Image (cartoon, rainbow, N blue to C red):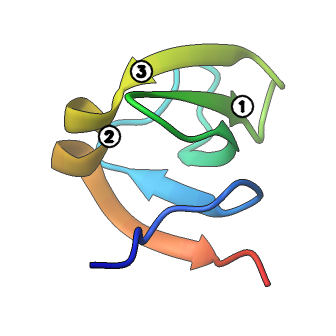
């Protein structure tokens, strides 16, 4: 099974970031994801299971 996430993808999650943006850029993929908010550039580490659970859509897939 191919992994549906790649570094450089922009994703939308169910909940918005406190700055108001709902889109995140993926910086690291593994057991944990490093995501960067596209609104305020804040970076967070989130477990893979939580990202998969809260994913709405992949907006810009990496080439």
Q: Residue at x 54, y 59 (%)?
A: 11
Q: Residue at x 47, y 36 (%)?
A: 30
Q: Is residue 52 above or below residue 17?
A: below
Dots 3 and 2: beta carbons under 8 Å? yes
- Please rate how many residues cluster around mark 3, counting C-alpha atoms within 10 Å: few if below 14, some from 14 to 19, many from 20: few
Label ID, residue 57? none
Residue underneath mark 3: 46
Secondary structure found at label 2: helix
Secondary structure found at label 3: strand
Residue underneath mark 2: 51
Q: Residue at x 38, y 78 (%)?
A: 2
Q: Position of residue 57 (x, y in %)?
A: 40, 71
Q: Position of residue 25 (x, y in %)?
A: 70, 47
Identify which residue, 22 or 11, lies in the foreground. 11
- Please rate how many residues cluster around mark 1, counting C-alpha atoms within 10 Å: few if below 14, some from 14 to 19, many from 20: some
Identify which residue, 7 or 37, lies in the foreground. 7
Q: Is residue 1 left or right of residue 36?
A: left
Q: Position of residue 22 (x, y in %)?
A: 53, 45
Residue at far front of view: 1
Quadrant containing the C terminus in the rendered view: bottom right
Measure the C-alpha gap from mark 1 to mark 3.
Answer: 11 Å
Measure the C-alpha gap from mark 3 to mark 2.
Answer: 7 Å
């Amino acid at each position: 099974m191919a992994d549906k996430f790649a570094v450089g993808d922009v994703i939308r999650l169910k909940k918005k970031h406190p700055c108001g943006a709902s889109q995140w850029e993926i910086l690291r993929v593994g057991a944990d994801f490093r995501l960067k908010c596209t609104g305020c550039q804040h970076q967070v580490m989130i477990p893979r299971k939580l990202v998969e659970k809260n994913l709405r859509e992949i907006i810009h897939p990496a080439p």
